[in-house]
Amino acid sequence: MSVDPMRRWPGMAGAAAAVASTAYAHVVAADAVDPMKGLISDYALLDTSAWAMVGGTIMLAMGSLWVAYGLARADPTRSAASRVLFVAGALGLLLTAAFPTDAAPGVTSAVGEIHRWSAAVVFTALPCAGWMMGRRFRNRTLSAVSVLAAVLLAAFLAAHPGSLTADLIGGPDYYGLIERLLLLSEMALVFLAAQGMGNLPDSNKRDISPLTDSPLTYANVGYGSVVSEGEPYARVQSDRAAA
């Protein structure tokens, strides 16, 4: 089957740009943010890395929206839940870009709360969307990455300072690293989901006209009909009229 590059490349490019921008922010702000303990959102508070983090977040949101659009074309009926989750993830990303987090040690403003809950939507919605899409289209790699993202989310919540288990497992010493791995897995998720768009048909529906030949035929069984492969539809209609 021929593949239209426009089905996959915009979404893949968005995810790839997000990876590149995030990596750039880590390089230029290496001395200001500890990758083991500092949150990724802290890069948006620095002049040297803010534009890269905001731009990368927006690009990842665009990639998620492109996947949702592709699902609407390929499977408009049964992909509704996945589409809603990809759109929710995209909106959450846009909100995290528009509302920066508060400076450490904690959230103290309404803007910071919006950022926190928007990030929670992103980290929750995208793994669920990727897993559902992977199951629907039998994409094992996408399903596996989605499960990995869910596991990393659970680890991040357990290690985050303030959680009941953080001190028991020494979470404050490495929870920043877990968040980075979580974000990277979700970028890979969007990339794989967009890549899979190129292998999907425009629609699951088949356009069958009663005035033209069709691969479907009808065999009379008693008073009913059975659909089978074989004679053209027009010939079966003629046989019925003769009967």
Image: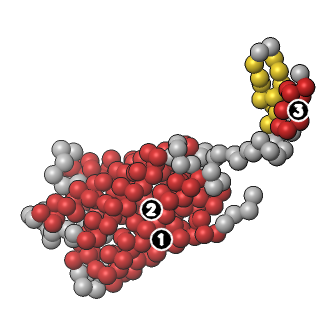
Q: Give, as a three-letter code, the residue at label 1.
A: Gly
State whether residue 119 is above or below residue 222. below
Assess whether mark 1 and mark 3 are in contact (beta carbons under 8 angstroms). Answer: no
Q: Position of residue 88 (x, y in %)?
A: 35, 55
Element assignment for label 2: helix
Q: Position of residue 210 (x, y in %)?
A: 77, 41
Residue at 22% over, 59% down? 116
Q: Give, as a three-letter code, the residue at label 2.
A: Ser
Classed neighbour count for the residue bearing mark 3: other residues with Cα under 10 Å, few (<14), some (14–19), many (≥20): few
Residue at 37% over, 61% down? 90
Residue with the mark numbered 1 = 14
Residue with the mark numbered 3 = 238
Assess whether mark 2 and mark 1 are in contact (beta carbons under 8 angstroms). Answer: yes
Numbered badge on residue 64: 2
Quarter occupied by the C terminus: top right
The answer to whether residue 152 shows anywhere in this view is no
Q: Position of residue 122 (x, y in %)?
A: 34, 57
State whether residue 146 is above or below residue 216. below
In 3D space, how far apart are the residues under numbered discs 2 and 3 (Cα atoms)?
50 Å
Q: Give, as a three-letter code, the residue at label 3.
A: Ser
In 3D space, how far apart are the residues under numbered discs 3 and 1 (Cα atoms)?
54 Å
Element assignment for label 3: helix
In depth, the one of 86 and 155 nearer the eye is 86
- The answer to which of marks 2 and 3 sits earlier in the sequence is 2
